[in-house]
Image (tube, rainbow, N blue to C red):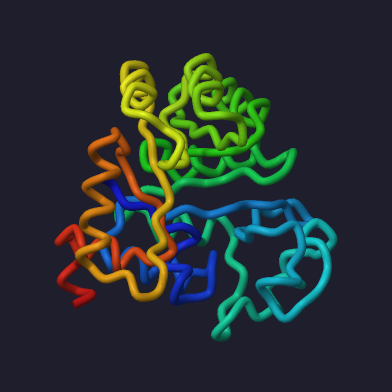
């Protein structure tokens, strides 16, 4: 099963920062996942929310601030908000990247940048918005895409099949083995979130991973990649 570091190693480092992504890479994850918005001057900015209020010491919408203004903010532990270009530069040749498009106007520049840095095969572009994903496929037919959906799983899988996606996150409490088999028959990978509650030991994590694998889950997204990789026996020697 592959492991996705959700916004990097965000359970222990400031989310969506180069520090968080670097930590995840050091641990040995297969993917890092990041979110992108556009700055006032058109740069792709890696941040989850449409405002900087929650994750930095600043205030205001990302779209209302220039790159230079955004770079003045503290995103935690003295980290700056990174650009997508900085995240791709950090990741190239080391780890695959899932880029979530959060707003209109991000598909074209994201595809353009991924092509420019020659990372199409190392990137998956995801979104809740099917029109964004269709635009990505129009611009780059070979680009892997991932559908995020709030619809019931059976409906979401049908939608995913129609779009021709690489993968999608699912709620492991809702998906059945039969649903997973249908997705797999169309080349769709399935991932689910696993963030162990305090007190859950490694044995519990191992059993949960076995359960997820048995119902057809292909990957795990987590804020705590060290816990998941350790339970899998895959924690990088550099991180031990």
Quarter-wise, where is residue 216 in the image? top left
| Image quadrant in which the C terminus is located | bottom left
Place of residue 178 in the rendered image (x, y in percent of width and height, measured from the top left)? 34, 22
Place of residue 17 in the rendered image (x, y in percent of width and height, measured from the top left)? 53, 69
Tell me: residue 10, above or below residue 33. Answer: below
Place of residue 204 in the rendered image (x, y in percent of width and height, measured from the top left)? 25, 62
Q: Nearer the viewer, residue 222 or 176?
A: 176
Classify residue 177 as left or right of residue 145: left
Classify residue 22 as left or right of residue 212: right
Tell me: residue 20, above or below residue 110. Answer: below
Quarter-wise, where is residue 206 in the image? bottom left
Tell me: residue 77, above or below residue 145. Answer: below
Classify residue 31 as left or right of residue 87: left
Q: Nearer the viewer, residue 169 or 206?
A: 206
Place of residue 47 in the rendered image (x, y in percent of width and height, measured from the top left)? 63, 60
Name the residue at 28% across, 53% down.
208
**Residue at the bottom extreme of this rendering:** 77
Name the residue at 47% across, 17% down.
161
Q: Nearer the viewer, residue 121 or 207?
A: 207
**What is the tally of numbered marks visible in this picture?**
0
Name the residue at 61% across, 36% down.
150
| Image quadrant in which the N terminus is located | top left
Classify residue 224 as left or right of residue 110: left
């Amino acid at each position: 099963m592959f492991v996705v570091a959700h916004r990097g190693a965000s359970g222990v480092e400031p989310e969506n920062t180069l520090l968080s992504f670097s930590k995840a890479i050091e641990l040995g994850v297969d993917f890092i996942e990041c979110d992108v918005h556009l700055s006032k001057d058109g740069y792709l900015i890696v941040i989850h929310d449409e405002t900087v209020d929650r994750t930095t010491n600043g205030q205001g919408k990302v779209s209302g601030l220039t790159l230079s203004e955004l770079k003045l903010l503290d995103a935690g532990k003295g980290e700056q908000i990174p650009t997508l270009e900085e995240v791709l530069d950090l990741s190239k040749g080391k780890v695959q990247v899932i880029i979530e498009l959060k707003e209109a106007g991000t598909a074209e520049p994201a595809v353009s940048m991924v092509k420019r840095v020659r990372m199409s095969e190392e990137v998956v572009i995801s979104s809740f918005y099917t029109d964004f994903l269709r635009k990505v496929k129009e611009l780059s037919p070979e680009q892997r895409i991932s559908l995020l959906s709030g619809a019931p799983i059976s409906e979401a899988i049908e939608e995913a099949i129609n779009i021709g996606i690489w993968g999608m996150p699912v709620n492991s409490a809702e998906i059945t083995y039969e649903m997973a088999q249908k997705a797999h028959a169309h080349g769709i990978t399935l991932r689910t979130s696993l963030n162990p509650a305090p007190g859950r030991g490694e044995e519990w994590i191992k059993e949960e991973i076995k359960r997820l694998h048995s119902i057809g889950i292909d990957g795990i997204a987590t804020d705590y990649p060290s816990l998941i990789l350790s339970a899998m026996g895959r924690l990088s020697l550099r991180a031990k």
